[in-house]
Each structure stands twice: as C-alpha cells, then as structure tokens.
Amino acid sequence: VAPPNTLAPRVSPTANPALTTINPPTHKRTPKDFIFGKAIGEGSFSTVYLAKDIHTGKEYAIKVCDKRHIIKEKKTEYVKREKEVLNMLAGAKHSFVRLFCTFQDMERLYFVLSYAKNGELLPYINKVGSFDIECTKFYSAEILRALEYLHGLGIIHRDLKPENILLDEKMHVLITDFGSAKILKDPEASVTTHPATDDSQQQQQQQQQQQQQQPYRRERRGSFVGTAQYVSPELLTDKTSRASDLWALGCIIYQMVAGLPPFRSRSEYMIFQKILKLEYEIPDGFCELARSLVSQLLVLDPTQRLGAQDEHGAGYPSIRAHPFFEGVDFETLHEQTPPPIY
Ligand code: ADE
C-alpha cells in the first residue's frame, strides 16, 4: 500500500501530551493530522507506517489498508473483524496493541495503533539463536496472560506467531494482527465447526460467512492464507477452538527454546503433513521442564491440551501451575523488568 500522499504541513509538534489529555481532539482525524514515516510492517493488503501526530508529537503505528484491494480479494470481513476485536480490546491495560482511532479517505482505511518501539519478537529469537530459560519463561508467561484475557472475551487469535508478538519500549509483549481472529458468539461453547459437519440451512449460511474468514483455508490458486508453521491440526481439519491458540503457544515456546519452530519443511503441504502426524523432534539439551510443557500443548486432540479443560473465563490455572512456570508472578508481569535477551 503506497504511503498516503499527504501534503501535511511540516508543523513542529507541540509535543505536549498533557494538553491532549485535558482537551482530547474532537474532530475526526485525517491523514493530515500525522506525518507519515517509514514502513514498519507489510500485510497482503495493508502497510503499517510509523507516524507522528503533528499536534502532540506522539508516535503511532498507522495501518493503511487499500480499499480496492480488500474488495477485490473479498477480505472486507477480515478488516471489519480486526476493527471489532481491537475495539473489544480497548479496555485492556496491557498485552495488546491499542486502537486509538480510525479514519478513511477515498482509497484507504487507516487504523491508528500503538507503536511497539522494539518491533517483533521474531528477530530477537533469530538474533540470539534461542532464549535462555529465564527469558522463555517470562515471554511465555506474558503471552499466556494475553491469551487468558483474549479468550476470556471469547476471542480466538488463530494466527499467533512470533511476528504478531510485538515488544513495547520496555520490552513487554503487545499482541497484534487480529485479521484472522474469531469472535465466539457463545463464549461458553468450546468448539466451532465447519459446514461439512453441520447441515441446517441457517448454520450453513453462518458457516459460509465464517468460511471466508478462516485463515488457513485453501484459496483458489492453491495457496494458503496465514502461517503454516503455527497452524493447529484442527484448523487444518476445520474445527476451531481456544485450544488452537494454545497449540500456537506450544510452537512459540518450542521456538524460543530451540531457535526454530517445531514443524518445519520446504513446502506448506509437508509442514501440514508433519503437524497432522505430530512429527517433531526435541533437540538435545532442550530444557526438560519446557519439553514437558510443550509436549502437553502440542497434543493432536484439542480437548486434551493443557488448559483446554480449564473453566472458561477463569484463565489457564493448569498451564500456570506447570512446573516450567515455577516462581513466575503472573499478576505483576507487566510491572516487572523483563529479563535481558542474549
Ligand atoms: N509492525 C506492525 N505493527 C506494528 C506496531 N504496532 N508497532 C511496531 N511495529 C509494527
């Protein structure tokens, strides 16, 4: 997505956030309220730019979506879903990127999001090869807390991966990219099913809508939407539950410890084959407690994953209680100084 052609006046920012707290902007924002900087993220129909509010000097990440492209690729539901989820998360005090406002012009939609100064988790894992146990514990715990909150609201992320886990200026986790998310109509119901196994007309209609939103559905040209490496087996066989995110958590914990995701292959098809056969290896020297936790999250039957039987809305006490997390104070994670990554 091309940067917006703003001929914004290069006004020097007043840089007084206190004033905007007292006098919040009452007018609908436009691209001219921001100075757009470098691209910091790229999606299939969107680009994220670093941008500065000309009135306050505050930095934001603005996701700019190309309307024509979204309509052409039939992705309007994804974009609506993302906005809906971000609005549902507006009350969260931490763990998620915040949506400050949205606006549009003729060609584009704009999502003004919090700027995660330290970018994605992925390059940190790649840079150091793998995290030590302190780091793995801390970041796994922060991701788990975020999932507890998300699932408590009946939201399943469905594309959790180290690229969607951002780090703020203090190196705390901010989860992003809710374009593949699912909002459970009945949060108590644990599983949603694909039309193949439902047959009432009403359900079929509902499911047809859902099918467009399924991130890992095969597209017409045979490519897949989403990210193969973290896909749970039930996403490949058309059932989604909260446990799908717990599978991805297992993959991410494995990756922090081992340096690479558990299911790797040259083609997506072969990755999927490995996932469906639970074909992964624990390398020598892999922390024993981490191995135990990962092996209880990477379970083919979603109902048998650690946490899957925990009461809805009560967090994941059974995951918190795993010995891997011994000594972690989950309640104060966001106030703690994260362990340094090296
Ligand atoms: N890349 C994508 N979204 C981002 C954000 N909110 N902050 C920093 N980098 C990003």
Image: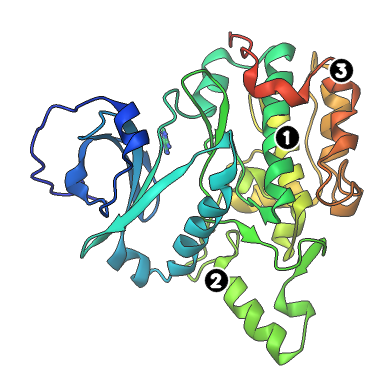
Residue assigned mark 2:
212
In percent of width and height, residue 300 lies at 84, 50
Alpha-carbon distance for marks 2 and 3? 41 Å
Alpha-carbon distance for marks 3 and 1? 14 Å
Q: At 74% across and 41% down in the image, what residue appears?
A: 148
Front-lying residue, 9 or 181: 9
Q: Is mark 2 within 8 Å of ligand 1?
A: no
In percent of width and height, residue 231 lies at 67, 49
Residue type indicated by callout 3: Glu
Front-lying residue, 125 or 115: 115
Q: Is residue 109 visible?
A: no
- The image's colouring method is rainbow
Mark nearer the N terminus (3 vs 1): 1
Residue assigned mark 3:
326
Discs 1, 2 touching: Cβ within 8 Å:
no
Residue type indicated by callout 2: Gln
Front-lying residue, 158 or 257: 158
Residue type indicated by callout 1: Leu
In percent of width and height, residue 339 lies at 64, 10
Q: Is residue 133 visible?
A: yes
Residue assigned mark 1:
144
For residue 246, what is the image quadrant? top right
Disc sitting over residue 67 in the figure: none
Question: Residue 158, relative to residue 192: is it above or below?
Answer: above
Between circles 1 and 2, the one closer to the viewer is: 1
